[in-house]
Amino acid sequence: MKDKEIEKLIKKEKERQAKVVNLIASENFVSADVLAALGSELTNKYAEGYPSKRYYGGNEIIDEVEMLCQKRALKLFKLNPKNWAVNVQPLSGSPANLSVYSALIPLGKKIMGMSLAHGGHLTHGQKVSFTGNAWKGIPFGLDKKTERINYEELLTRAMIDKPDIIVAGFTAYPRKIDFKKFRNIADLSGAILMVDMSHFAGLVAGGEYPSPFKYADVVTTTVHKTLRGPRAALIFSKRDDRCFPEKIDKAVFPGLQGGPHMNAIAGVAVALGEADTPAFKTYAKQVIKNAQTLAAELKKRGWRIISGGTDSHLILVDTWLDGKGITGKEASERLEKEGIIVNKNAIPFDTRKPFDPSGIRLGTAAETTRGAKEKDMIKLAGRIDKILKN
């Protein structure tokens, strides 16, 4: 590389990643093939529009790339193209969710999603997000005793508030979601059911987490978490007389985006192909084994695990322990000094402020990519415990 300043910084970041233990739940390590696609000549091409409907010339091969990505996305999740469509152009998860709302529900209408304080995402109608200002957010929380979704309470709330769209998904909720119950709630309250599977998409692909496609109207996901792809997103939508795919396509382009990042779309196609293999199924199974082992070992050492455990790659740990432990911010900083990277995170019904909350969020997807097994998680739990109690 001729630009030695950037080359030096890239090298330093590569070295940093190599020497730390990565427990960020929303991160992973992509393959060399994904990196090759991201750094390819596809970066050079402008491709506003969709296959066979571009606003620039010279897109014959680009069309093939995008259609291959669509084909692989539908195949990976066992979807019939007659019944489902997929848009592969969203730049990331937040604009993907924004595209769905702008396509399907008028401004000012109601979005019901999990509260940010209880594990939901900013784009699920939270006030601090544009989605909670352009639309009316109706947050639902967790049961205080179980720290899990109470579907009866959720139904009662939905029948009172009558949301236009219900979002099932999370950024810090470790348990499986009952999509059948969400479907029933959406039907009874007259809402569209959208599932944001950004965190657990790779586990769905690997057959280790329930698939939302039997019940959802729309499914969004990022690709860079458990799917082990580049930073990008996908929007799946049912084909029926409501014309969701056509509306969503228009919302993505020209509604919210211009030319798609074709190098990223190629990287997504590579990652989807890698996920459609027996090796990836083994990987997804190991991700959950590792998470459950790590959670159990930390619990043995006296740390409170939110909801008592995990069904996914994600663990939420109460480090504050009603003032007997340390804050999530201090825990994160202590661990980082010792080469273990996590993120501070609020826990349900947290009494502390979001910037210095009561817990930390851990994830096992990245370290499992590196080959970690249960024995490694046992050792890691011991290290974490020692660092936090020092």
Image: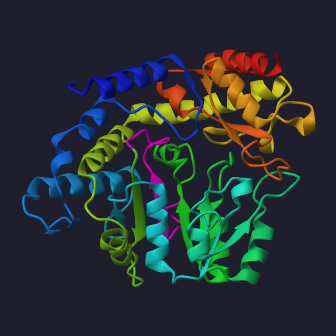
Secondary structure mostly seen in the magenta stretch: loop
Q: Quadrant of residue 328?
A: top right
Q: Is residue 72 above or below residue 16?
A: below
**Which residue is at a point 58% across and 38% down the rendered structure image?**
25
Which residues are the magenta region?
A: 212-230
Specify whether 21 is left or right of 260. Answer: right
Q: Is residue 287 above or below residue 203?
A: above
Q: Is residue 232 above or below residue 18?
A: below
Residue closest to the eye, 390 or 63: 390
Q: What colour-coding does the image apply?
A: rainbow
Q: Is residue 300 above or below residue 158?
A: above
**Which residue is at a point 83% across and 58% down the rendered structure image?**
143
Q: x, y (%) of residue 78?
A: 39, 55
Q: Is residue 359 magenta?
A: no
Q: Quadrant of the C terminus?
A: top right
Q: Quadrant of the N terminus?
A: top left
**Which residue is at a point 29% across and 50% down the rendered structure image?**
265
**Which residue is at a point 12% across and 65% down the rendered structure image?**
56
Q: Quadrant of residue 37?
A: top left
Q: Quadrant of residue 138?
A: bottom right
Q: Is residue 227 magenta?
A: yes
Residue closest to the eye, 360 or 134: 134
Residue closest to the eye, 240 or 387: 387
Labels in figure, total: 0
Specify whether 231 is left or right of 60. Answer: right
Furthest-left residue in this view: 58
Q: x, y (%) of residue 334?
A: 71, 23
